[in-house]
């Protein structure tokens, strides 16, 4: 892998390019990867002991979530990737829970505002964005509590 998702990753966007498949917004700059968003997410999941599919299935089962499931990558650092829509669709943008400062309605879409004052317009309603951010927070807090109990 050329880029490793970590605590400074803000968002990943699919791009149509002859060489690159993903544009990555990071606190330290913008990067491009030859790998898809899903490949980068799966690599990050595997580094923490489970595949993308395994984490998705666990979250769906334990918390009774059906679709567009946020994927926790590291509970200790609060790294949780949130899909803007169906991960099965090419246009799905992934943004990261810990970096969201605010969001607002803009032209039937949502403008995400990150803590570093960068912003990103996603094709998703404000209501759906709010629901996804709440889901991600619920996932992180639920699993942090589970880890404390063991």
Image (cartoon, rainbow, N blue to C red):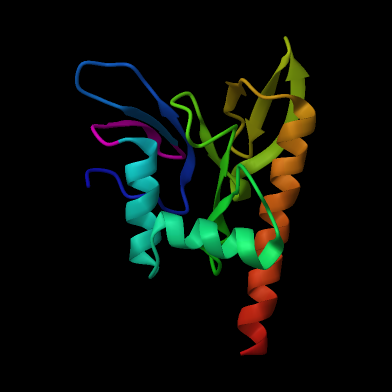
Image position of 1 (left or right of 36): left
Q: Which residue occupies the foreground of this view, 23 or 119?
A: 23
Residue 31 is a magenta residue: yes
Q: Nearer the viewer, residue 8 or 62?
A: 62
107 over 14 or under it: above or below: above
Question: Which of 120/82 is in front?
Answer: 82
Give the camera-side residue of 106 and 90: 90
Marks counted in the figure total 0
Residue 118 drawn at (x, y percent): 57, 28
Which quadrant of the figure has residue 123? Answer: top right
The image quadrant of residue 47 is bottom left
Q: In the visual, does 31 lie left or right of 27?
A: left
The residue at 65%/68% (across/down) is 62
State the quadrant of the C terminus: bottom right
Tell whether position 97 is magenta: no
**Left or right: where 73 falls relative to 70:** left
In the picture shown, does residue 37 fall above or below 15? below
Q: Is residue 74 left or right of residue 102?
A: left
| Residue located farthest toward the top when viewing the structure as drawn | 107
State the residue at coordinates (47%, 34%): 88
The residue at the point 40 percent across, 48 percent down is 41
The location of residue 52, given as percent across then percent down, is 42, 55
- Where residue 19 appears, as percent x and y from the top left, is 19, 22
Measured along the vertical axis of the image, is residue 142 above or below residue 96? below
Range covered by the magenta-colored residues: 26-35
Quadrant in which residue 122 is drawn? top right
Q: Main secondary structure of the magenta part?
A: strand
């Amino acid at each position: 892998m050329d880029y490793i998702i970590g605590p400074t990753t803000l968002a990943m966007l699919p791009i149509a390019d002859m060489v690159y498949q993903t544009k990555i917004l990071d606190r330290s700059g913008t990067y491009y990867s030859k790998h898809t968003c899903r490949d980068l997410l799966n690599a990050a999941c595997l580094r923490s002991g489970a595949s993308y599919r395994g984490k998705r299935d666990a979250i769906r089962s334990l918390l009774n979530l059906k679709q567009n499931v946020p994927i926790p990558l590291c509970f200790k650092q609060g790294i949780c990737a949130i899909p803007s829509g169906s991960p099965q669709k090419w246009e799905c943008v992934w943004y990261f829970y810990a970096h969201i400062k605010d969001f607002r309605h803009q032209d039937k879409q949502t403008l995400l505002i990150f803590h570093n004052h960068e912003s990103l317009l996603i094709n998703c309603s404000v209501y759906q964005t709010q629901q996804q951010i709440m889901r991600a927070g619920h996932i992180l807090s639920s699993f942090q509590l589970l880890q404390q109990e063991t």
